[in-house]
Amino acid sequence: MILVAGSANLDFVVRSPHIPAPGETVLGRDFKTFPGGKGANQAVACSRAGGVPTHLLLALGDDAFALPLEASLQAAKVNLHIVRSKTLATGIAFICVSDAAENAITVAPGANHCLQLIDLPPLDGFTHLLLQLEIPLDVVTAYARAARARGVTVVLNAAPAQHLPHEFLALIDVLIVNEGELAVVANFSGSIAQCLALVDVPCVIVTLGKHGCCARADGVYLLQPAFDVTPIDTTGAGDTFCGVLVAALSEQESLQQALRMASAAAALACTRFGAQSSIPTLDEVAAFFGNHANATDAQHAELMKFCGFNFPTG
């Protein structure tokens, strides 16, 4: 059983030909709202795409924006622990999605900053605690410390990127980052292989978009090339990856298998609009997974070169 503690936002999404540069105005096309927020997205992914019992600790405002978030989470069979703010609005995110499926996101956290240590539910029965950085760092640190004390595996998706103190990283069992976040955490601008060597966490997983992902665990390096899809919206793909990966690990899958399952789910999410609305079901992931062969030696070699590895990987 997994506990996710983190943010929930209502996403305001505009599609446009390209993402505006500073000072530029771009005429967009369709506008929609979608349930989002890293914590909520990852909880939906754990439950819907990962198929495991999932709880979510979140904070919402006492407003209309909270309603679609609660409805989406309940539809995904996520068990909710809601802190309700009477003074702050539900978090929102403004998202521009380009025709190339790239996105730019601005978040107004609102009620997400209301979470405190006392809000953490009892940890009995949970195997993993999944955290992100859209709630205050001191609260995330307190949750990680409490979970460590109870023998719960602590997983951190270090997003949005920020420098993290060594004392905090010492509480983390599994760290999930993208390429930019890895450089910030490592405080180094070298290759992925060089940055990985500088992060003192037992297991570090790096998502690399269209290239795939790689991991370092107990001194062993693993590679998973990306599945080939035509993306239309990458919003939520990273969160889908995180949720499915943790779900797979909680079911005692090997890390290599968990990387492949998470990559398959994230690839599917890229072919649909929205964050939570793009997250596939467990059956869809299994079907996609079963219809795609393992990566070729050439794909592995290409990913190995991209990461800067010059030694054999697992």
Image (cartoon, rainbow, N blue to C red):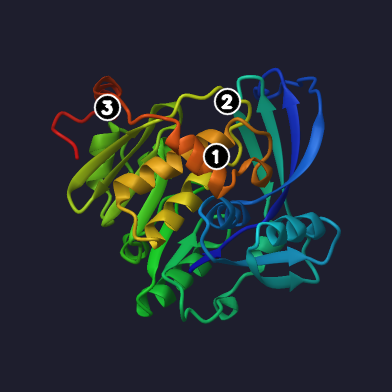
Q: Marks 2/3: CA distance?
A: 21 Å
The picture quadrant where one finds residue 14 is top right
Q: Identify the residue at horizontal 25%, vertical 46% (top origin).
A: 216
Residue 143: x and y, percent?
48, 71
Contact? badges 1 and 2 (CB < 8 Å): yes
Q: Residue 54: give x, y in percent of width and height.
A: 55, 65
The three-letter amino acid code for the residue at tag 1 is Ala
Q: Residue at x 29, y 53 (%)?
A: 203
SS category of the residue bearing label 3 = helix
Say few, some or many: other residues with alpha carbon within 10 Å of mark 3 (under 14 / 14 to 19 / 20 or more). some
- Residue of label 3: 300
Count of marks placed on residues: 3
Marks 1 and 3 sit apart, C-alpha to C-alpha, by 22 Å
Q: Which of the 4 image quarters holds residue 201?
A: bottom left
> Residue at label 1?
237
Depth check: 142 or 217 in front?
Answer: 217
The residue lying furthest to the top in this view is: 17
Could you tell whether 194 is left or right of 7 in the image?
left
Horizontal and vertical percent for residue 150?
A: 38, 80
Numbered circle sitting on residue 231: 2
